[in-house]
């Protein structure tokens, strides 16, 4: 694939079981991405380096997933002007994932993070594609086809149910 347009980062290797969904949908859509682990708490300098270098190396959107005290998406958003999509991950010792959701969602004014649902990495991938597709015709076309496929799936399910 060509130079990555989307950077997918996660606070721990343990987040990969969720975050791989973002990578999968980007692959389905033929959008280049890179994937790595960057921890806000365990590797803060790596996080700052990643976020400050992101635009310069060609990334256009960052998807950041983390669980618990999930500071990664917000801190990345604090040092880059690229759009950041946050994925709250329901980590095993969390309070039903609310810690992850609220840590990512409740950003101060001026530093937005587009927060998707708990463990919603697939939607994060789709949203990243849509951000790119707003100015890229080829990606936009793929997304239109993607949306048509969603519609067709629901319509054929509806027909099956109605015919019973
Ligand atoms: C967060 O703590 C990570 O994003 C992960 O969701 C959670 C647990 O990490 P590990 O202890 O499994 O490395 O920083």
Image (cartoon, grey):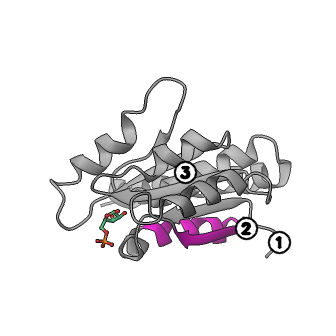
| Separation of marks 2 and 3 at Cα, in angstroms | 26 Å
Instruction: Please say if the residues under marks 2 and 1 sit with CB atoms less than 8 Å apart.
Output: yes
Q: Is residue 24 visible?
A: no
| Separation of marks 3 and 1 at Cα, in angstroms | 30 Å
In this rendered view, identify the residue nearer to me: 48 or 138: 48
Q: Reply above or below: 41 against 15.
A: above
The residue singled out by tag 3 in the image is: 151
Looking at the image, residue 84 sits to the left or right of residue 21; the answer is right
Q: How many marks?
A: 3
Nearer the viewer's eye, disc 2 or disc 3? 2
Secondary structure category for the residue under label 1: loop
Numbered range of the magenta stretch: 19-37
The residue singled out by tag 2 in the image is: 32
Labels 3 and 1: the sequence-earlier one? 1
Nearer the viewer's eye, disc 3 or disc 1? 1
Labels 2 and 3: the sequence-earlier one? 2
Secondary structure category for the residue under label 2: loop
Q: Reply above or below: 23 against 52.
A: below
Other-residue count near label 3 (Cα within 10 Å), few / some / many at <14 / 14–19 / ≥20: few
**In which quadrant is the C terminus drawn?**
bottom left
Other-residue count near label 2 (Cα within 10 Å), few / some / many at <14 / 14–19 / ≥20: some
Looking at the image, residue 27 sits to the left or right of residue 75; the answer is right
Q: Is residue 12 magenta?
A: no
Labels 2 and 1: the sequence-earlier one? 1
Secondary structure category for the residue under label 3: helix
The residue singled out by tag 1 in the image is: 2
Q: Is mark 2 within 8 Å of ligand 1?
A: no
**In which quadrant is the N terminus drawn?**
bottom right
Q: Position of residue 119 (x, y in %)?
A: 36, 59
Q: Position of residue 8 (x, y in %)?
A: 57, 63
Looking at the image, residue 153 sits to the left or right of residue 137; the answer is left
């Amino acid at each position: 694939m060509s130079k990555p347009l989307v950077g997918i980062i996660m606070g721990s290797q343990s987040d990969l079981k969720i975050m791989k969904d973002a990578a999968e949908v980007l692959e389905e859509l033929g959008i280049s991405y890179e994937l790595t682990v960057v921890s806000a708490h365990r590797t803060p300098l790596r996080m700052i380096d990643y976020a400050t270098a992101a635009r310069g190396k060609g990334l256009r959107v960052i998807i950041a997933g983390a669980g618990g005290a999930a500071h990664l998406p917000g801190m990345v958003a604090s040092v880059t002007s690229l759009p950041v999509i946050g994925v709250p991950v329901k980590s095993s010792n969390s309070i039903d994932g609310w810690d992850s959701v609220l840590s990512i969602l409740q950003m101060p004014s001026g530093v937005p993070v587009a927060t998707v649902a708990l463990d919603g990495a697939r939607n994060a991938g789709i949203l990243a594609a849509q951000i790119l597709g707003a100015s890229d015709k080829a990606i936009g076309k793929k997304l239109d086809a993607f949306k048509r496929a969603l519609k067709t799936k629901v319509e054929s399910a509806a027909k099956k149910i109605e015919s019973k």
